[in-house]
Amino acid sequence: MKYDYEFFKKSADYVKEVSGGFTPEIGMILGSGLGGYADKIDAVCVIDYRDIPNFLVSDAPGHMGKLILGTAEGRRVVCMSGRFHSYDGYDFEELTAPVRLMKLLGIKELILTNAAGAINRDYEVGDVMLITDQIKLNGSSPLRGPNIEEFGPRFFDVSKMYSRELIKIAKEAAEGSGLTIREGVYFFMPGPQYETPAEIRAAGMLGGDAVGMSTVTESLTAAHCGIPVLGISLITNMAAGVLDVPLDGDHVIEVGNRSAKLLVPYFSEIIRRLP
């Protein structure tokens, strides 16, 4: 498959046509158990991923698999309810598709959410971690292969990939929300199996505060495109070996759904405050 500018433009052209030329300011990619915010969007149109040319399909539990364009808190947004993972069988290069589509639609900021397991023993289930940095030691870069200059340069800086300005806004938006806000490093593991206790101990020694199976390819693609990123992890469980309990995907979704009462208004407040 030839992943060139025209390949991704075909996806964007279809979405623009179906949405009547709708131009979003803010992109959102919602993770497991966190898709409830999609119901708050006053939708202009909702598009099934399967209908978008050159796009991917999400089969993960708890993911709707819909692209939603509309308004939220008076802002124009495009929201992916459901995301793609390397464990779905996609190459890392394929996982550039969502953010490149949003870039071509016109977004200026990107919010990424996920469910994550706590490595940091000070964290508790239900906490929200604002991602300050990430560690990705598994798999290739999503930007491997011929560079597409229309999106960004061959070599690009990722030292400020997660915007300090957006983190500050997210911290301020949490005041009075009832949420416990953390700041930490997201450690990527490819899954779909959960990590071993030994892997979690290693991740902790390397500086990881929470672990998950998504987000990093999207943030790297956004950095290549010059899009500021706000990363938000909902702590749905303690990582393997932190507690002597088995890990369960249904529990992850359950915690996400339970937390929606606080998370949905929190996301709304963040969007209201975005520049």
Image: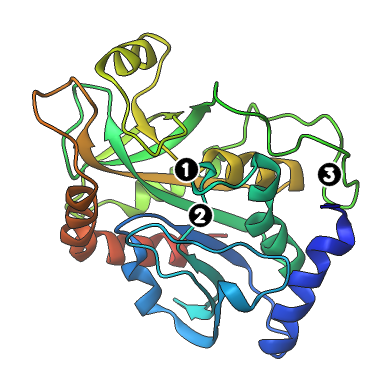
Marks 2 and 3, the one that precedes in the sequence: 2
Please give the residue where the numbered disc 3 appears in the rendered image.
152
The secondary element bearing badge 1 is classed as: loop
Question: Label 2, on which residue?
Answer: 111
The residue nearer to you, when weighing 186 against 139, is 139
Q: Nearer the viewer, mark 2 or mark 1?
A: 1
The amino acid sitting under disc 3 is Gly
**Residue 172 in the figure: left or right of residue 78:** left
In the displayed structure image, the side of residue 76 where residue 145 appears, left or right? right
- Residue at the image position 43 percent from the left and 11 percent from the top: 206
Q: What is the secondary structure assignment of the residue under circle 2?
A: strand
Reading the image, the residue beneath label 1 is 214
Q: Is residue 55 left or right of 27 when viewed as pictured? A: right
User: Residue at the spot x=17%, y=21% of the render?
Assistant: 242
Residue 121 in percent (x, y) is at: 19, 21
* Residue type indicated by callout 1: Ser
How many angstroms separate mark 2 from mark 3 (CA)? 20 Å
Colouring mode (rainbow / by chain / secondary structure / one colour): rainbow
Q: Is residue 66 above or below residue 121?
A: below
